[in-house]
Image (cartoon, helix red, strand yellow):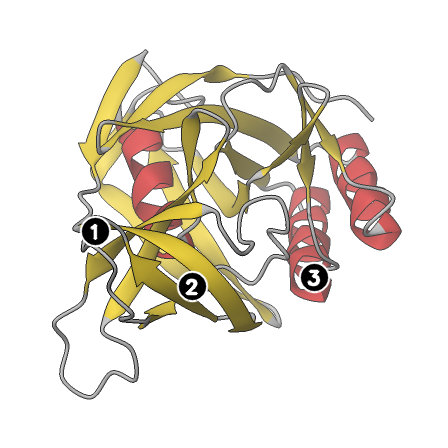
């Protein structure tokens, strides 16, 4: 395993409800019989039914930002004996850490100052444009994966038109001769394979298979969030 960086948290809490996709109501733990309820921002549009449900434990962090509607951010949710990162705000930082580390990068050594974020391509905005030491440019999109069944990581856990649009843009660039890739950040450490979730979003699954056949590289990166550290474990195989 390779240590990438730390993501600290401030408070352990218990989920009470999820009024909408981006808000979780929870009660802090270790405060006796407190009736305090916290309104927490959940930065992940997925369904997360196996992670965010009444009674489950979560890790949250205080956000001291003026003008915010919520004072807390949800960092991770408990699943059995592990903590699953459920905050997409860290995805770009994690992906960049993987790319910059010579022992984890799927692209070899990259130029330190030549990783551009949020690159406009056609009607989409892709996460990265990477330049390698060999002066090769790579367009890359990043997705977070928190669902796993029978040791197979599945993406998405909810239909994603935006995700399909990103794949279509990568396919177009690949057909034009550019090197392209999509990186799935897999936060379920028991996963041994990665597969598109055809049952939930057949359109995305079809687009990912088309992307693969058109030369778009697919990298499911297995990660673990433990002791406030994001750890890189491996790249797992893709099955269709």
Q: Nearer the viewer, mark 2 or mark 1?
A: 1
How many neighbours does mark 1 have within 10 angstroms: few (below 14), some (14-19), or many (20 or more)?
A: some
The residue at the point 24 percent across, 83 percent down is 68
Which residue position holds label 1?
11
Point out the image quarter for the N terminus: top left
Q: Secondary structure at mark 3?
A: helix
Q: Say the numbered circle drawn on residue 165.
A: 3
Q: Secondary structure at mark 2?
A: loop
How many neighbours does mark 2 have within 10 angstroms: few (below 14), some (14-19), or many (20 or more)?
A: many
Q: Is residue 239 above or below residue 217?
A: above
Q: Name the side, left or right, on which 165 lies relative to 105.
A: right
Q: Secondary structure at mark 1?
A: strand
Q: CA distance from mark 3 to mark 2?
A: 24 Å
Q: Name the side, left or right, on which 17 lies relative to 205.
A: left
Q: CA distance from mark 1 to mark 3?
A: 37 Å
The residue at the point 82 percent across, 40 percent down is 210
Rendered location of residue 229, percent (x, y)? 23, 30
**Residues tagged 3 and 2 counted as in contact (Cβ below 8 A):** no
Point out the image quarter for the C terminus: top right
**Which of the two residues, 166 or 81, is positioned nearer the viewer here?**
81
Q: Is residue 236 above or below residue 12?
A: above
Rendered location of residue 197, percent (x, y)? 78, 40
Looking at the image, tell me whether mark 1 or mark 3 is earlier in sequence order: 1
Q: Name the side, left or right, on which 18 lies relative to 40.
A: right
How many neighbours does mark 3 have within 10 angstroms: few (below 14), some (14-19), or many (20 or more)?
A: some
Outermost residue to the bottom: 67
Q: Say the numbered circle drawn on residue 42.
A: 2
Q: Say the numbered circle drawn on residue 44.
A: none
- Rendering quarter of residue 83: top left
């Amino acid at each position: 395993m390779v240590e990438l960086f730390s993501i600290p948290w401030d408070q352990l809490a218990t989920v009470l409800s999820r009024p909408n996709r981006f808000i979780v109501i929870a009660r802090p733990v270790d405060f006796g019989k407190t009736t305090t309820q916290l309104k927490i921002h959940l930065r992940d549009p997925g369904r997360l039914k196996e992670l965010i449900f009444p009674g489950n434990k979560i890790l949250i962090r205080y956000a001291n930002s003026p003008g915010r509607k919520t004072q807390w951010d949800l960092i991770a949710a408990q699943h059995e004996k592990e903590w699953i990162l459920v905050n997409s705000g860290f995805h770009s930082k994690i992906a960049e850490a993987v790319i910059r580390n010579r022992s984890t990068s799927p692209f070899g050594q990259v130029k330190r100052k030549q990783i551009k974020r949020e690159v406009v391509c056609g009607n989409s905005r892709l996460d990265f444009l990477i330049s390698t030491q060999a002066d090769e440019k790579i367009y890359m999109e990043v997705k977070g994966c928190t669902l796993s069944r029978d040791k197979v990581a599945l993406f998405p856990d909810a239909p994603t038109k935006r995700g399909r649009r990103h794949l279509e843009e990568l396919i177009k660039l690949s057909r034009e001769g550019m090197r392209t890739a999509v990186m799935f950040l897999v936060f379920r450490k028991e996963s041994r394979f990665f597969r598109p979730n055809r049952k939930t979003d057949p359109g995305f699954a079809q687009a990912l298979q088309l992307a693969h056949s058109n030369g778009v590289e697919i990298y499911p990166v297995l990660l673990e969030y433990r002791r406030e550290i994001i750890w890189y474990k491996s790249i797992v195989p893709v099955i269709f």
